[in-house]
Amino acid sequence: MKEFTDLELAKSYHGHLGPYLVIGIKMGNKAIRELQPESCFRLQTHVYCPDSPPPSCVIDGLQLSTGCTMGKRNISHTETTQGVRVVVTNKDTGRSVELNLNEDFIRQAEQILKDAGEEEASMFCWNAADDEIFTTRCLTTC
């Protein structure tokens, strides 16, 4: 599978380009690199986040980047009161990765959003290194 990089398509799909959408894309891309699935049909994604925007917008980014969708029933969501955590599993190998959003990073992105707007905050997220945005941990041998 290839990484998802089309931010214009993401904006069109989601309705706007926001930091959490971009973060979801980057989390999904990282999971794809780590797990190397044959196709999106071989992945299962579980998202733990608040049940309202903007944090829940991470779900749309994950759907775009992993190909896991509500229609295929290979993405699910559990509501939490704070934080964003994602677990992606390659169903063929049983390998799983956990990605946890760095709260300090999202505070920086939210400040940029407030000060400079949505486009700047989104590009701040897009241009940041993965390990600045979230931590990645293998739950099984990776």
Image (spheres, grey):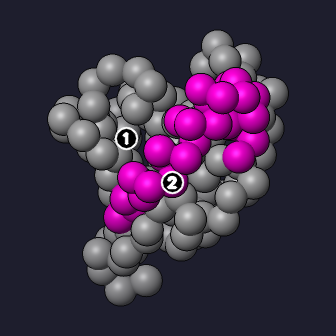
Residue drawn at x 75%, y 41% is: 123
Amino acid residing under circle 2: Phe
Foreground label between 1 and 2: 2
Residue drawn at x 29%, y 38% is: 49
Amino acid residing under circle 1: Asn
Which residue corresponds to mark 2? 105
Residue 91 appears anywhere in the view: no
Which residue corresponds to mark 1? 74
Q: In this view, does 112 lie above or below 90?
A: above
**Dividing the image into 4 quarters, which one contains the N terminus?**
bottom right
Residue 113 - label: none
Location of residue 9 by image quarter: top right
Please give the range of residues in magenta. 98-124
Nearest the camera: 76 or 84? Answer: 84
Q: Is residue 103 left or right of residue 80?
A: right
10 Å crowding of disc 1: few (<14), some (14-19), many (20+): some
Q: In this view, does 93 lie to the left or right of 117?
A: left
10 Å crowding of disc 2: few (<14), some (14-19), many (20+): some
Residue drawn at x 71%, y 46% is: 124
Is the magenta region chiefly helix, strand or loop? helix
Q: Where is residue 120 in the image (x, y as percent from the top left)?
A: 75, 34
Nearest the camera: 59 or 49? Answer: 49
Q: Where is residue 6 in the image (x, y as percent from the top left)?
A: 79, 38
Which residue is the extreme one toward the bottom? 141
Q: In this view, does 135 lie above or below 107?
A: below
Residue 133, magenta (yes or no): no
Q: Where is residue 141 in the image (x, y as percent from the top left)?
A: 35, 86
Sequence-first tag of 1 and 2: 1
Residue drawn at x 34%, y 46% is: 84
